């Protein structure tokens, strides 16, 4: 069965916000707590891999793990009659042995790809990772960049190849294996009803505007931030101060220097123009 909907993004691009919205849309009778999101986990879950393969992932190399991951998702799809909404930060790529795509088409119903201005991603990702802006700017342009790639300790997630920010975006929106809808974070903020309605319809949710507005209200940034202040958020990086920090558009204008902005623009100009983050004359749109 093709019943997996991938909720894919480069980190800090609106993925978690959408998962909370979707949870509120799925279960309208109650306001969803941020520590009880009703979607179906993350593709890089080590627990999922171990349970599906009956192999301890700690006994394998990271490439051996990636070679088996498509079969994990096929097994997950075959073993469920319901649609699975699974978060993914990996770029869309082939397995190291080249035999399969990491996200197999024969298990995949669709993908939503969330994208955000890389200038704002740099700020949010730095705070999330507890890194300085210069280091994150290097990460955004590193073709070898990956999360959970440490060989010194075992994390609860498997390696996730991100590549450069531009490469990550293009890997998902230009692939033709899985139907994909791209959603800009800025449109989610500025045109919420229209944008979230489009996303819901794309993945098969025929909800009226009242239902969507109610789910959006229950997923507002102020509510999410307050919930985190009250009870914490289990998905927050352990050393970071908070997960739901500002959620603003254009925060980079306050946080980044002109030189840092120039470095990001120089590396990602082509894709920024393609996605409307930069005008043809070189002016920044946001």
Image (cartoon, helix red, strand yellow):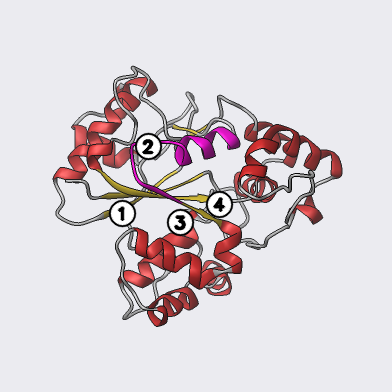
- Residue in the foreground of this view, choosing between 215 and 124: 215
Q: Spatial distance from mark 4 to mark 2, Cα to Cα?
A: 22 Å
User: How many residues crowd around disc 1 within 10 Å: few (fewer than 14), some, or many (20 or more)?
Assistant: some
User: How many residues crowd around disc 2 within 10 Å: few (fewer than 14), some, or many (20 or more)?
Assistant: few
Closer to viewer: mark 4 or mark 2: 2
Sequence-earlier tag: 3 or 1: 1
Q: Spatial distance from mark 1 to mark 2, Cα to Cα?
A: 24 Å
Q: Spatial distance from mark 3 to mark 1, Cα to Cα?
A: 15 Å
Residue 216 in sight in this render = yes
Q: Is residue 180 magenta?
A: yes
Q: Is residue 47 magenta?
A: no
Which residue has dot 3 on it? 234
Which residue has dot 1 on it? 40
Which residue has dot 4 on it? 13
Sequence-earlier tag: 1 or 2: 1
Task: State yes or no: discs 3 and 1 in contact (Cβ < 8 Å).
Answer: no
Task: State yes or no: discs 1 and 2 in contact (Cβ < 8 Å).
Answer: no
Q: Spatial distance from mark 3 to mark 2, Cα to Cα?
A: 34 Å
User: How many residues crowd around disc 3 within 10 Å: few (fewer than 14), some, or many (20 or more)?
Assistant: few
Instruction: Give the magenta part as a residue range.
Output: 165-181
Give the residue at the far right of this rendering. Answer: 258
The image shows residue 92, relative to residue 20, as above or below, that is above
- Residue in the foreground of this view, choosing between 184 and 259: 184
Closer to viewer: mark 4 or mark 3: 4
Q: Position of residue 10 (x, y in %)?
A: 53, 43
Q: Residue at x 68, y 60 (%)?
A: 249
Which residue has dot 2 on it? 176
Task: State yes or no: discs 4 and 3 in contact (Cβ < 8 Å).
Answer: no
The image shows residue 217, relative to residue 124, as above or below, that is below
């Amino acid at each position: 069965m093709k019943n997996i909907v991938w909720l894919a993004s480069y980190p800090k691009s609106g993925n978690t916000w959408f998962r909370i919205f979707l949870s509120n849309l799925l279960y309208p009778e109650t306001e969803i707590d941020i520590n009880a999101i009703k979607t179906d986990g993350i593709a890089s879950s080590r627990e999922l891999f171990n349970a599906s393969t009956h192999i301890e992932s700690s006994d394998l190399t990271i490439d051996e793990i990636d070679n088996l991951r498509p079969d994990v998702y096929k097994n997950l799809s075959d073993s469920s009659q319901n649609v699975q909404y699974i978060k993914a930060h990996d770029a869309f790529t082939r397995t190291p042995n080249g035999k399969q795509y990491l996200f197999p088409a024969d298990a995949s119903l669709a993908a939503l790809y969330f994208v955000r201005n890389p200038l704002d991603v740099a700020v949010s990702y730095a705070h999330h990772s507890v890194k300085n802006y210069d280091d994150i700017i290097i990460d955004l342009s590193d073709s070898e960049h990956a999360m959970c790639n440490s060989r010194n300790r075992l994390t609860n997630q498997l390696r996730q190849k991100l590549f450069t920010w531009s490469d990550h975006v293009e890997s998902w929106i230009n692939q033709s294996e899985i139907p994909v809808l791209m959603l800009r974070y800025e449109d989610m903020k500025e045109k919420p009803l229209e944008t979230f309605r489009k996303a819901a319809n794309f993945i098969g949710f025929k909800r009226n505007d009242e239902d969507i507005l109610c789910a959006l209200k229950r997923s507002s940034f102020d509510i999410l931030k307050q919930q985190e202040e009250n009870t914490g958020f289990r998905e927050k990086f352990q050393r970071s101060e908070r997960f739901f920090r500002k959620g603003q558009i254009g925060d980079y204008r306050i946080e980044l220097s002109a030189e840092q902005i120039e470095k990001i623009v120089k590396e990602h100009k082509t894709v920024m123009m393609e996605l409307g983050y930069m005008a043809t004359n070189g002016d920044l749109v946001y």
